[in-house]
Image (tube, rainbow, N blue to C red):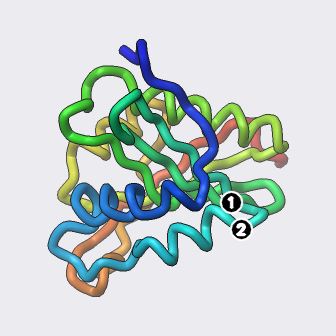
Amino acid sequence: MITDASIRLATCADAANIAALSRDHIEHGLEWSWTPARVERAIRHPDTNVAVVRDARAMLAFGIMSYRDDSAHLLLFAVRRSHQRLGIGSVLLRWLEDVAREAGIQQINVECRRTNSIARNFYCEHGYQEKIISPGYYAGVEDAIRLEKWLATPDV
């Protein structure tokens, strides 16, 4: 579990580390799209939260979530492989969900590679439901699974 790590909002100084973790853990096999410049734009964007988990030595995890009126989109989420299965991802995801709830968000959407059973299981364990397959979502070469989680009962 998280012991000597803390969650905080990212600063522009974190952009290169976030981008490298995305390149190595999320975008492997694809053209690198979450470059340091793009991550920095997300950090500066008023409708986006970029949260990081660090210990004294390194960045362990990050999540990037954008907000609309009543829904949020988890754009990127990664935990360094050496620190997976320790509860860091769960704590970070709950932190992002709590912020979304406080902002009045009712629903969170996220995508992951169809072949990424670890991510699919992680999200399902946290109450996300697989909704549709998006063929070629990732650079036209890999399918995505779109998942959603309702934080509040949808208005009927």
The residue that appears at 51% across and 33% down in the rendered structure is 92
The reply, left or right, for residue 43 in relation to residue 4 is right
The image quarter in which residue 118 lies: top left
The image quarter in which residue 113 lies: bottom left
Amino acid type at circle 1 is Thr
Q: CA distance from mark 2 to mark 1?
A: 6 Å
Q: Look at the numbered discs 2 and 1 and tell me whether their residues touch, using CB distance below 8 Å.
A: yes
The image quarter in which residue 28 lies: bottom left
For disc 2, the marked residue is 45
Place of residue 101 in the rendered image (x, y in percent of width and height, measured from the top left): 76, 36
For disc 1, the marked residue is 48
Quick one: label 2, few (<14), some, or many (20+) residues within 10 Å?
few
Place of residue 29 in the rendered image (x, y in percent of width and height, measured from the top left): 15, 73
Place of residue 135 in the rendered image (x, y in percent of width and height, measured from the top left): 31, 78
Quick one: label 1, few (<14), some, or many (20+) residues within 10 Å?
some
Amino acid type at circle 2 is His
The residue that appears at 75% across and 62% down in the rendered structure is 47
The reply, left or right, for residue 95 in relation to residue 124 is right
Place of residue 152 in the rendered image (x, y in percent of width and height, measured from the top left): 75, 36
Residue 156's place in the image compared with 153, above or below, is: below
The residue that appears at 36% across and 47% down in the rendered structure is 78
Residue 13's tag is none
Residue 89's place in the image compared with 80, above or below, is: above
In the image, 37 versus 34, the foreground residue is 37
Give the SS element for disc 2: loop
Which residue appears farthest toward the bottom when viewing the image?
Answer: 140
For the N terminus, the image quarter is top left
Give the SS element for disc 1: strand
The residue that appears at 57% across and 45% down in the rendered structure is 51
Residue 112's place in the image compared with 103, above or below, is: below
In the image, 142 versus 21, the foreground residue is 21
